[in-house]
């Protein structure tokens, strides 16, 4: 790809910054961290910052990412266990403490607005520099489907280094050369004499040794665990109810808080009846805030019932007339006004798209809530100049920093616990519920305060997936191949919104590549292509939502590809394959999908199939949806999914995440729509913000491609293709093209 001026300037700045930082290549030993970072209990010995071994041989792995259902408490310990040669039954997982060694470097590298297939000098310089910046910043963020990708080298290195130290300790104890020692199932074995020592017996001796300077990782041919469907470490606790989520935290003397926030963004608290509220059963305290009212009670239900019985009133402020129509009108005006910031500009797309044979289309996607099953919550205890916080979150070090700033405390005085998350999807990267809980706790000192948002509060005061409007123009050549493509998207900047809330006053300039994820750098060959974005701020707060820009851009681009296939009178899969000659992985996924989905077989009466192919987070996913209409409702009969996520750690987790992403995406495609009227979110709870039910969920067949590529993400890539696959099936079934979400049955 030829870099445009913006990419050149970004890469040049990155190269200059890299030289300024002056970091050399990281040695594997530097990834291990200090053993002292890992808290130990009686009988446990830490061999580095990633693992500790108990006397009974139990190996506990520090997991640096939040477990929110995506399986990191299983996948990441597998990396350690494989290199350590430890039996899976001996592995345990616990949340890593806050320390720079656990920082997520990959999420920083992925922030670059680069085609992952661009391996040129400037692109390499940008990635190199961002990696070094990532190691300096060392943010412990969970997101971007980066958990396995980021942990692949450091956690395997930690297991291999520990294996080496245990082998040397065993050799010294047995009086034999270390080269004669073999690691096997939690023991160091000397085959010649059939003597062996368990890891628990050797841990103390091994901890006194220096880590190896050179770390040797096991070759794939020797793997015993990686690639196998091992049982999840968190399964038993989540089944028997002993798992602790944020909402389950209980501290002595806790008061429980419910909240009412101004329904219009920018509104303020107008009136409330303190006397009547304090007279309600179980009420302990009433805490007014600038735009909200909190009530603390002996139980959350006492607090919530008080607010229902004696509700406050609010001044709507300046945005009391805002509507969803106003937002989309602003998007349309931005698209009319100019061509925005171009992230991809090859050939002369604009010059090739003036003739009458140009196909044009406009697509739109609504604002969406996260609707995590566990509502937002936070527990805070302020005592003797220190703070202890229990918060399901996706960035504990950032939360600690934000809390310390809010409390005017040194970060060392703030302790953040990260329990299990009952769904994250980007919502728990936000500090709002923590900052609310801190403000309330300051008004109720020396007591633990647990704030829980009601479902209504949660839905109406989310940081929403942004709405978006996209316009397309394309032209086919005389052979029916794509000749020119222009895509212009208008929506607010997600990254600027999130960073602006986390770091008020931080200067945020320039374009945001997250808005065009899934629109730029498509795999299809087009001689002339321009993809641009116009940033249009909106009043409702927006944030990261599972698969971010891919979630709406995949719908836009893959539906438009189907329209072009129709204009070329080509089969949708064959049309795509004709434009994938240079992309073998995408071709293989699509060809396999064609065969496994029975694409070329006649559909059952009253049904039709639709296809979508989309790459995101270094993985490629193709899906075919079979759709019918029954009693005025869209029914998805079957979904066939093919995923190439590179090296697979645990196939069961990959399959589960594809299924999860498809159900999540189907909910949005069929029902998701947060609307604004009179400045207020109109959806209140699940009756009017509907979820896909078990009975509505289709059979999902997931097939994993073994491609030999490096690990890709799996938490998010299953979501983007499902909406366009269903929309394309509906178009085939009804003959009517829907260009807006959510999809509706005709009639």
Image: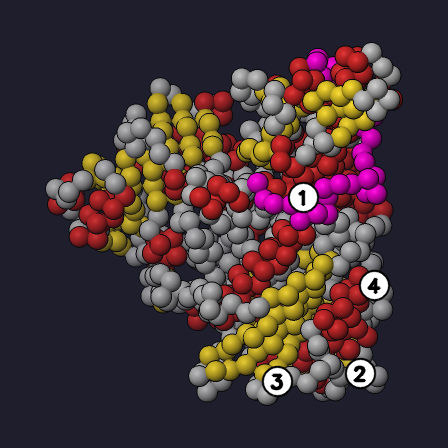
Distance CA(mark 1)–CA(mark 4): 24 Å
Q: Looking at the image, is mark 1 or mark 4 earlier in the sequence?
A: 1
Q: Looking at the image, is mark 1 or mark 3 earlier in the sequence?
A: 1
- The residue closer to the viewer here, 234 or 567, is 234
Q: Nearer the viewer, mark 2 or mark 1?
A: 1
- The residue closer to the viewer here, 531 or 545, is 545
If the image is split into quadrants, where does the N terminus sit?
A: bottom right
On the question of residue 134 being in view, the answer is no
- Report whether 223 appears left or right of 400: right
Above or below residue 658? Residue 293 is above
Which residue was labeled with disc 4?
A: 584
Which residue was labeled with disc 3?
A: 604
Q: Nearer the viewer, mark 1 or mark 3?
A: 3
Magenta stretch bounds = 205-233
Distance CA(mark 1)–CA(mark 3): 40 Å
Local crowd size for mark 2, using a 10 Å CA cut-off: few (<14), some (14–19), many (≥20): some
Q: Nearer the viewer, mark 3 or mark 2?
A: 3
Distance CA(mark 2)–CA(mark 1): 41 Å
Q: Nearer the viewer, mark 3 or mark 4?
A: 3
Q: Main secondary structure of the magenta part?
A: loop
Percent position of residue 331, x then y: 53, 67
Q: Are marks 3 and 2 in contact (CB under 8 Å)?
A: no
Q: Are marks 4 and 2 in contact (CB under 8 Å)?
A: no
Local crowd size for mark 4, using a 10 Å CA cut-off: few (<14), some (14–19), many (≥20): few
- The residue closer to the viewer here, 710 or 566, is 710
- Report whether 628 appears left or right of 57: left
Label 2's element? loop
Which residue was labeled with disc 2?
A: 480
Distance CA(mark 3)–CA(mark 4): 32 Å
Which residue was labeled with disc 1?
A: 148
- Report whether 485 appears left or right of 640: right
């Amino acid at each position: 790809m030829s870099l445009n001026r913006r990419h050149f300037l970004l890469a040049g700045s990155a190269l200059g910054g890299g030289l300024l930082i002056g970091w050399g290549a990281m040695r594997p030993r530097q990834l291990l961290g200090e053993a002292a970072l890992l808290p130990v209990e009686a009988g446990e010995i830490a061999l580095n910052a990633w693992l500790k071994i108990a006397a009974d041989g139990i190996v506990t792995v520090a997991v640096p990412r939040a477990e929110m259902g995506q399986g990191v408490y299983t996948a990441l310990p597998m990396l350690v266990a494989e290199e350590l040669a430890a039996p899976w039954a001996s592995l345990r997982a616990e949340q890593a403490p806050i320390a720079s060694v656990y920082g997520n470097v990959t999420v920083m590298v992925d922030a670059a607005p680069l085609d992952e297939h661009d391996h040129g000098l400037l692109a390499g310089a940008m990635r190199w520099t961002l990696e070094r910046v990532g190691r300096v910043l060392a943010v412990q963020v969970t997101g971007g489907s980066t958990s396995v990708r980021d942990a692949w080298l450091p956690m395997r290195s930690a297991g291999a280094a520990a294996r080496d130290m245990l082998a040397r300790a065993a050799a010294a104890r047995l009086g034999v050369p270390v080269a004669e020692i073999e690691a096997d199932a939690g023991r160091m074995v000397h085959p010649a004499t059939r003597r062996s020592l368990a890891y628990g017996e050797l841990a103390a001796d091994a901890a006194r040794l220096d880590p190896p300077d050179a770390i040797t990782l096991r070759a794939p041919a020797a793997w015993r665990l990686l690639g196998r469907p091992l049982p999840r470490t968190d399964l038993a606790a989540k089944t028997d109810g002993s798992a602790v989520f944020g909402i389950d935290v209980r501290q002595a003397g806790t008061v429980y808080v419910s909240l009412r926030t101004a329904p219009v963004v920018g509104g303020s608290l107008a009136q409330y009846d303190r006397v009547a509220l304090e007279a309600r059963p179980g009420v302990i305290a009433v805490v007014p805030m600038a735009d909200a009212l909190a009530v603390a009670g002996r139980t959350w239900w006492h607090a919530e019932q008080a607010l229902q019985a004696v509700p406050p009133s609010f001044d709507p402020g300046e945005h009391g007339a805002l509507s969803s129509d106003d937002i989309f009108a602003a998007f349309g005006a931005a698209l009319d006004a100019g061509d925005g910031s171009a992230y991809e500009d090859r050939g002369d797309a604009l010059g090739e798209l003036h003739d009458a044979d140009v196909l044009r289309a406009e697509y739109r996607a609504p604002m969406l809530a996260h609707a995590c099953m566990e509502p937002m919550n936070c527990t805070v205890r302020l005592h003797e100049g220190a703070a202890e916080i229990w918060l399901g979150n996706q960035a504990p070090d950032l939360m600690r920093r934000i809390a310390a700033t809010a409390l005017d405390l040194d970060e060392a005085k703030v302790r953040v616990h990260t329990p299990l998350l009952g769904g994250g999807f980007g919502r728990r990267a936000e500090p709002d519920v923590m900052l609310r809980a801190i403000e309330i706790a300051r008004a109720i000192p020396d007591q633990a305060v647990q704030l829980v948002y009601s479902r209504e509060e949660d839905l109406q005061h989310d940081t929403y997936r942004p709405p978006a409007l996209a316009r397309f123009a394309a032209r086919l050549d005389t052979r029916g191949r794509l000749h020119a493509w222009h895509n212009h998207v208008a929506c607010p900047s997600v990254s600027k919104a999130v960073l602006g809330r986390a770091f008020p006053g931080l200067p945020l300039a320039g374009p945001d590549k997250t808005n065009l994820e899934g629109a730029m750098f498509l795999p299809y060959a087009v001689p002339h292509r321009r993809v641009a974005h116009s940033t249009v701020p909106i009043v409702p707060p927006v944030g990261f939502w599972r698969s971010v820009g891919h979630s709406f851009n995949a719908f836009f681009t893959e539906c438009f590809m189907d329209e072009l296939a129709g204009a070329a009178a080509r089969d949708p899969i064959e049309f795509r394959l004709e434009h994938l000659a240079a992309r073998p992985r995408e071709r293989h996924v699509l060809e396999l999908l064609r065969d496994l989905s029975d694409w070329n077989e006649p559909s059952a009466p009253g049904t039709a199939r639709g296809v979508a192919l989309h790459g995101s987070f270094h993985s490629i996913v193709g899906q075919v949806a079979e759709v019918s209409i029954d009693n005025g409702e869209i029914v998805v009969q079957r979904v066939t999914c093919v995923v190439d996520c590179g090296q697979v750690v645990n196939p069961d987790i990959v399959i589960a995440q594809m299924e999860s992403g498809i159900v999540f995406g189907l909910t949005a495609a069929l029902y998701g729509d947060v609307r604004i009227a009179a400045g207020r979110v109109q959806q209140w709870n699940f009756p009017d913000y509907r979820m896909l039910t078990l009975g509505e969920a289709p059979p999902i067949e997931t097939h994993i491609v073994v491609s030999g590529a490096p690990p890709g993400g799996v938490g998010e890539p299953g979501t983007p293709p499902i909406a366009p696959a269903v929309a394309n099936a509906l178009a085939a079934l009804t003959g009517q093209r829907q260009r807006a979400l959510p999809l509706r049955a005709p009639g």
